Amino acid sequence: MRINRPTLRLHVQEDQREFAKLVDTFKAQYNDGPRVQWGGHILGPKSQHKLKKRERAIAKELAQRNK
């Protein structure tokens, strides 16, 4: 049993030109689109807590080494 699959056929030069225009438009929109930067490099409360906890553990370890 064969399954019919839709295919994109570009036999006519007119269609190829139109397709090329679409490709150029989509590439321009994708590559030159707005760059969204989220958060401004500010850590959330969970991440801040983890870093503080890690820093305290490192400070504690260094204090034990220096004794």
Image (cartoon, helix red, strand yellow):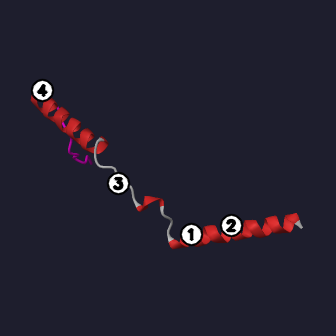
Please give the range of residues in magenta: 1-10
For the point 29% across and 42% down, the residue is 32
The residue at which mark 4 appears reads as 13
Q: Are marks 2 and 4 in contact (CB under 8 Å)?
A: no
Helix or strand or loop: what does disc 4 sit on? helix
Taking the image as shown, residue 42 lies to the left or right of residue 61, namely: left
Q: Amino acid at mark 3?
A: Val
The residue at which mark 2 appears reads as 55
Q: Amino acid at mark 2?
A: Glu
Of all residues, the one furthest to the top in this rendering is: 13
Residue 26 percent coordinates (x, y): 23, 42
**Which quadrant of the rendered structure holds the C terminus?**
bottom right
Q: Are marks 2 and 1 in contact (CB under 8 Å)?
A: no
Q: Residues within 10 Å of mark 1 (few under 14, many from 20)?
A: few
Quadrant in which residue 31 is drawn: top left
In this view, the residue in front, 61 or 32, is 61
Q: Residues within 10 Å of mark 2 (few under 14, many from 20)?
A: few
Reply yes or no: does residue 8 show up in magenta. yes
The residue at which mark 3 appears reads as 36
Of all residues, the one furthest to the right in this rendering is: 67
Residue 58 percent coordinates (x, y): 74, 65
- In primary-sequence order, the first of circles 2 and 4 is 4
- In primary-sequence order, the first of circles 4 and 3 is 4
- In primary-sequence order, the first of circles 4 and 1 is 4
Q: Amino acid at mark 4?
A: Gln
Main secondary structure of the magenta stretch:
loop
Q: Residue 48's mark?
A: 1
How far apart are the two marked residues, 4 and 1, measured between alpha carbons?
59 Å
